[in-house]
Image: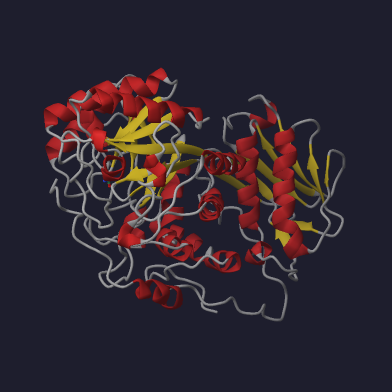
Amino acid sequence: MNPHHRTTRLFGSLLLTAAVGISCVGAAPARPAPGPPPPPTPLSQVIPAPASVDAGGSAYRINPGTTIRVDGGSRDVRRIGDYLADVLRPSTGYRLPVTAHGGGNTIRLKLTGKETGDAKGLGDEGYRLDSGSRGVTITARRPAGLFHGVQTLRQLLPAAVEKDTRQSGPWLIAGGTVEDSPRYAYRGAMLDVSRHFFTVDQVKRYIDQLSLYKVNKLHLHLSDDQGWRIAIDSWPRLATYGGSTQVGGGAGGYYTKDQYKEIVRYASSRYLEVVPEIDLPGHTNAALASYADLNCDGVAPPLYTGTAVGFSSLCVPKPLTYEFVDDVLRELAALTPGSTIHIGGDEAHSTSHADYVTFMNKVQPLVTKYGKSVMGWHQLTGATPVKGAIAQYWGYDATGAAERKQVVDAAKNGTKLVISPADRSYLDMKYTRDFPLGLSWAGLVEVQRSYDWDPGTYLAGAPADSILGVEAPLWTETLSTSANLEVMAFPKLPGIAELGWSPAATHDWDTYKVRLASQAPRWDALGIGYYRSPQVPWPTN
Ligand code: ACM
């Protein structure tokens, strides 16, 4: 791969950023037309497409007497009931008490704990939604399944349900049954908080958007040349100095441990696991600038606010390097209830191959020592992935056969793969040549290109059971506000989420684009600005 492929572009004018908010976002929704209410949304019209739908029977109408029934005892179920009530109350104006009792006229959240009876075949994240004239029941084996079922329920209601002021309804849910569980266990989104820093509230906003589409991993890219974003007590200057700027020279920032824990907690309340990444041994200028001793020559480089890649490397021969990495991984593991820590490993163009292999093979056991699984970008397969390692494939059409083969061979040897092709799933690739935000080193990626591929067959020769799932990374060299994130993520993110969740048999661009179009009023109601791709038949207001 060309080492300089993404070195060039410094984003021209931040003023263009504001222009995107005007030129690309959807128009405000129109008033409801007079006449009979529209029929309820068909059960199959959600994203990700459900695994199975059996439509029929009477719709349920949420009404002033509706209760949200949470079956006794479980705090998780009550919390999900409260979450659902928080979505429904402002727009419906109904009381919607969350209660352990109730007969008919309920939205019932039923947790079985075991995979028998109603919950047969649903696994850890699946759910069953039964809707009829007396109410709706969502059944799941685990809380995550109930939560995902609630997201389906949201999408079955009119988009106005997402508004935070009282709307007219009616609040109809079509009759029938949805049985749904994910194709893949790993359905991720990555946010680069290093090139530009994003606050806890901005990250929470993105988490809420991810959870709409049943994404279950938030990969946080916490360190890079331009900024170190997580407080590490044993090396405090990483955050206080290494985090003090960002691309373009702005103030940057970092998360205190308490703030980081709050992100992890919030993600967990939306059934997302945070996968933290410390990118090593390249992409480390912020660390090298913070501690002169980490450099082979003992001289700290200046902080960096450009967008080149591949120029920094930790000092592989120095013993201090491994004390540093051990400290960072120990403190990060202690902040990580999830199973996995990502150690980067991409674009180490200033590290010799021999040094790269030495480094990655010494560092992986430091992750497992703290009880976590290793994840790395697919260059990790050029070293010796430890047992249980996950390689994240970010190649694209231009990636050479030898590089692909190395990844496929590792998969045959037991390394699991998360697939995130740069010219398909990278949300920061420009839609069109003149799009004011994003990069184009992997090409232009419009909505159809982003959706129309199969993670199960993308990497020819990789065993089907090596594919853990998909991810949609969002790099932020050119993105500095939530509006910037959203106009890149929408409408491409829901497509990657669908590739991760829905059975391959449901995959069809022509029907997907219609489902995608029908999400637009929902984004309008939620204040999410999106790119009105000409490939999608958006509703005309
Ligand atoms: C990457 O895009 N450098 C993983």
In the image, what residue occupies the spot 73% across and 57% down? 88
Residue 316 rendering spot, x and y as whole percentages: 19, 28
Q: How many marks?
A: 0
Viewer-nearest residue: 246 or 265: 246
Q: Quadrant of the N terminus?
A: top left
Image vertical order of residue 419 relative to residue 385, above or below:
below
The answer to whether one can see residue 490 in this image is: yes
- The colouring scheme, among rainbow, by chain, secondary structure or one colour, is secondary structure
| Quadrant position of residue 24 | bottom left
Image vertical order of residue 284 relative to residue 427, above or below:
above
Q: Quadrant of the C terminus?
A: bottom right
In screen coordinates, is 262 left or right of 82? left
| Quadrant position of residue 377 | top left
Residue 236 rendering spot, x and y as whole percentages: 41, 38
The answer to whether one can see residue 221 in this image is: no
Residue 447 rendering spot, x and y as whole percentages: 36, 61
Image vertical order of residue 310 relative to residue 26, above or below:
above
In screen coordinates, is 232 left or right of 305? right
In the image, what residue occupies the spot 39% across and 27% down? 327
In the image, what residue occupies the spot 37% across and 68% down? 535
Image vertical order of residue 73 relative to residue 41, above or below:
above
In the image, what residue occupies the spot 74% across and 67% down? 169
